[in-house]
Image (tube, helix red, strand yellow):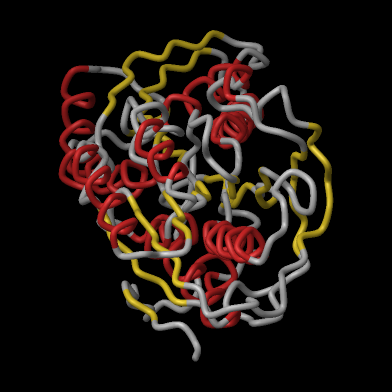
């Protein structure tokens, strides 16, 4: 099924039901308080009962990852007849800006807010403040602790890191390598996803039969300039590296920097995929990446919000938390994952405001 089709569902998802209790929440995992995972097919609503306006807050729009989420949100909003008012904070370091933007959306009388939080815990207060105004908050992509969050459309980034590690371990073993030195670039340290990719990766690598040394872990915002600087620093500091693993911005930048430093022979694996990285995999310059199917997460977040506004109860009438199954895209199987199916049209430009149908 292509991401841009109006009849894009059903898709296979991993869902959790029940009442959310943040006291039992562990970062990177669905809450133990929820029942699941239930493997099921996602079915979207046909039309919103009323022409709602949904506020959206993203960490940034600096790379194509969030552009793909934007595409999913806008396409589904158009299909359901609801409006969108989208703001972006400009980066994972801009917590105060995102908090103020959430207040701005509340003052704009939106019916609900879809949030891609810049931090796992630091937005708990503003989510509670928003919920107290009877404005539901659906978290998308980035996990949050947030006792008052209404629902979540996302996958486990622990799983994303695990699948990246699983691929790397299998490949290295197939090549007869038994001593690996790895540099890891998770992303922003306080986010609701980057630390969990590292944890998942480390757990997967426990099954590698040889010796593993993670020689560097470098945290930073997912801007290209920051990630490129971190990669150059590590390559200058470390004489021997077998694999560079990390966020999609780092993995996209890595092949050119590796060549620039004359360090051929370093394999690159990503923990998630963006359009520019897809092209690197297709050309064999990056080995693999799991895909969290961001367009579908965006669509599912809109579906959840519309169901909430229409009166359905998350955790009962539909999942409190749900996200697509995670495939691993490699140089060998990329032909099975068309670009448009993962990201939408190549010429898509992000939309920040969409009027609801009258």
The image shows residue 239 at horizontal and vertical percentages of 25, 17
Whether residue 299 sits left or right of residue 250 in the image: it is right
Q: Nearer the viewer, residue 213 or 272?
A: 272
* Residue 140 visible to an observer of this rendering: no
Q: Nearer the viewer, residue 193 or 199?
A: 193
Q: Residue at x 20, y 31 (%)?
A: 230
Q: Residue at x 52, y 35 (%)?
A: 148
Q: Nearer the viewer, residue 163 or 114?
A: 114
Q: Residue furthest front?
A: 133
Residue 203 occupies quadrant = top right
Residue 222 occupies quadrant = top left
Count of numbered circles on the image: 0
Residue 268 occupies quadrant = top left
Position of 253 relative to 32 (above/below): below
Q: Residue at x 43, y 36 (%)?
A: 128
Whether residue 119 sits left or right of residue 139 in the image: it is left
* Residue 209 visible to an observer of this rendering: yes
Whether residue 109 sits left or right of residue 62 in the image: it is right
Q: Nearer the viewer, residue 197 or 89?
A: 89
The image shows residue 185 at horizontal and vertical percentages of 34, 30
Please identify the quadrant where the N terminus is shown. bottom right
Whether residue 236 sits left or right of residue 161 in the image: it is left
Position of 325 relative to 356 (above/below): above
The image shows residue 209 at horizontal and vertical percentages of 66, 12
The image shows residue 236 at horizontal and vertical percentages of 16, 24
């Amino acid at each position: 099924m292509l991401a841009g089709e109006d009849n894009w569902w059903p898709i296979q998802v991993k869902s959790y039901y029940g009442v959310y209790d943040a006291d039992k929440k562990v970062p990177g995992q669905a809450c133990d308080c929820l029942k699941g995972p239930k493997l099921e097919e996602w079915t979207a609503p046909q039309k919103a009962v009323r022409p709602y306006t949904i506020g959206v807050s993203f960490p940034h729009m600096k790379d194509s990852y969030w552009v793909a989420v934007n595409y999913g949100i806008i396409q589904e909003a158009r299909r359901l007849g609801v409006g969108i008012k989208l703001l972006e904070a400009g980066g994972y370091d801009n917590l105060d800006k995102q908090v103020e933007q959430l207040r701005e959306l509340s003052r704009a009388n939106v019916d609900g807010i879809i949030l891609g939080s810049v931090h796992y815990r630091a937005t708990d207060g503003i989510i509670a403040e928003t919920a107290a105004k009877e404005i539901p908050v659906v978290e998308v992509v980035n996990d949050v602790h947030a006792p008052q969050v209404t629902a979540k459309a996302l996958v486990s980034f622990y799983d994303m890191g695990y699948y990246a590690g699983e691929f790397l371990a299998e490949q290295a073993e197939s090549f007869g390598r038994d001593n690996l030195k790895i540099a890891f670039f998770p992303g922003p340290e306080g986010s609701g996803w980057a630390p969990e990719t590292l944890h998942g990766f480390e757990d997967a690598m426990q099954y590698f039969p040889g010796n593993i040394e993670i020689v560097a872990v470098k945290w930073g915002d997912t801007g290209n300039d920051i990630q490129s600087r971190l990669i150059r620093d590590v390559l200058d500091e470390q004489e021997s590296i077998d694999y560079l693993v990390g966020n999609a911005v780092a993995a996209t930048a890595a092949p050119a920097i590796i060549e620039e430093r004359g360090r051929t022979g370093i394999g690159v694996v990503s923990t998630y995929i963006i359009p520019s990285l897809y092209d690197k995999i297709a050309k064999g310059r990056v080995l693999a990446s799991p895909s969290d199917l961001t367009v579908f997460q965006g669509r599912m977040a809109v579906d959840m919000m519309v169901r909430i506004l229409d009166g359905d109860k998350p955790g009962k009438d539909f999942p409190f938390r749900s996200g697509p199954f995670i495939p691993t895209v490699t140089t060998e199987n990329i032909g099975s994952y068309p670009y448009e199916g993962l990201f939408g049209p190549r010429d898509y430009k992000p939309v920040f405001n969409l009027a609801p149908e009258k």
